[in-house]
Image (cartoon, rainbow, N blue to C red):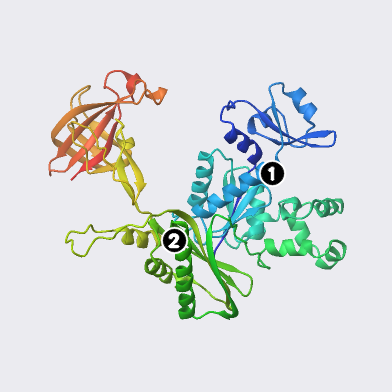
Amino acid sequence: MPRVVSIFFPDLPTDRIRRADPAIPAEEAIAVISKSGSKRWVSAADPAARKAGIHVGMAAAKAQALFQGLRMIDADAAADAAALERITIWALSQYSPIVAIDATDGIVMDTEGADHLQGGEERMLTSIANRFRAKGLTTRVAIADTWGAAHACARAINRETVVVPSGETIRAVERLPISLLRLPEKIVGDLRTLGFRTIGELSATPRAPLALRFGPEVGRRLDQMFGRVCQPIDPIRSPELVEVSRAFAEPIGAPETINKYVGRLVVQLVAELQRKGLGVRRTDLIVEKVDGTRQAIRAGTAKPVRDVAWLTKLFRDRTEKIEPGFGIEMLTLVAVMSEPLEEKQKTSSLVDDEDADITPLIDVLGNRGQRVFRVAPVASDVPERSVQRIAAVGEEVTEGWVHHWRRPVRLFARPNPIEAIALLPDHPPASITWRGKRHRVKRADGPERVFGEWWKRDSEFEAVRDYFVVENEIGERYWIFRSGDGIDPETGSHKWFMHGIFG
């Protein structure tokens, strides 16, 4: 069952200001000031300002008097809204086919289609938070069974991520304040006057009196939060996106009928892309059903394409996942990520040698949720920093490593601690113990000294490693190192580590 992710940006106005003006010192406090007539108040404050005692709702004059070094900037709701729209469109291209703006401070997305984010929900949310943090945006990310529950939990937590287990919505939200129920402020104020404080208290109250006084809105929001009523996410669209759709007077549901119309939509999409000189990298099929729900399928390619047959195959391989329910009333095909693509002459059949193109294999693996990438060398003396992941299809990397010493075939992401018996400072170990097994060293070569990157990190100014290639009694060869030079404790701990395996 698809789940819903809500991403809340608590510091969106101040984060936007810092991104727009990188010259603002990181330690300088920022407060955003809103005004109405002669009244001026703090509508947003960054962490530095909050640490100084500034809070939302405080009078601007009081905030300025409280903290003399406070940078006060006028609120710009239009710029904040535009920034949130750009963030949402970016998330649409990266995470899920169904992404929408959620209020004025967040976005919401259906997890279906985010299959490429592997490793469980907690790792998925952590990855999302990390990517936004890298872009200079503070986030709170929650996943739950419903939009309402995810929205409330993202705004209630004081940590980056929260996972509400499937089926535990009531337990997660019953103690949250009614202000997180997405009700108008007037209704929230009146409910507080009547003594309601939490969502649990409100949900336990008979509906008839609430509906008589406040109308159907309170009951509707409660039903949406607890999943009794479906709340479809209307995905964001941009004029720049190439999109084609087909509505049906009579709902469809047979697999062969779905595939037929998907093929026709692909032809229309490719024609539009060709007219604009574009090739598609990521395409979404949005299925709108009679009951108001939506389902989405995403197909990606390693490089821009306009191949009708190939795009049709990518979708037909996955249309079996579509659950038509009571019927499908509209199919929409959207090119959410496209790039310029020039027409190229294909290889002539008169030429015998033709380069094998593995792009179709990469596309198939990628659309099955597997992350396909290449590794390329990086100019770094520190072994674990000397490689990087790059796109599976792209420009050839001409750079290589410059080393006088051989490197192991398998390099561990993190060096494994080992025990070693060795004479300091320059002798190789006589034996090592790794993962509980003792290896007697028959042959060894080294040491190869590797210095820390002191120009990048002050902590590595004196750090060194001494690497050895060692071979045990049955011919297995390992790449090990001692942290430090074996004499000065300032250069390292003098502990031993296994870093790689040869052959």
Give whichever of discs 2 and 1 has the lower sequence position: 1
Residue 471: percent from left, percent from top: 15, 38
- Would residue 117 appear left or right of 76 to someone viewing this image? left
User: Along the line of sight, which residue is nearer the eye, 156 or 330?
Assistant: 330
User: Along the line of sight, which residue is nearer the eye, 306 or 117?
Assistant: 306
Asked whether residue 164 appears in the rendered view, the answer is no
| Quadrant in which the N terminus appears | bottom right
Q: Secondary structure at mark 1?
A: helix
What residue is pinned by disc 1? 78
Give the CA distance from mark 2 to mark 1.
35 Å
- Would residue 125 appear left or right of 105 to someone viewing this image? left
- The residue located at (23%, 57%) in the rendering is 355
User: Along the line of sight, which residue is nearer the eye, 277 or 250?
Assistant: 277
Asked whether residue 257 appears in the rendered view, the answer is yes
Q: Give residue 291's mark.
A: none
Circles 2 and 1, Cβ within 8 Å, touching? The answer is no
Which quarter of the figure has residue 452?
Answer: top left
Q: Nearer the viewer, mark 2 or mark 1?
A: 2
- Would residue 12 appear left or right of 273 to someone viewing this image? right
Residue 88: percent from left, percent from top: 58, 51
Q: Residues within 10 Å of mark 2 (few under 14, many from 20)?
A: some
- The residue located at (76%, 55%) in the rendering is 183
Total marks placed:
2
Up/down of 226 relative to 474, above or below: below
Q: Secondary structure at mark 2?
A: helix
The kind of residue tagged 2 is Gln
Up/down of 2 relative to 409, above or below: below
What residue is pinned by disc 2? 274
Up/down of 431 relative to 307, above or below: above
Which quarter of the figure has residue 110?
Answer: bottom right
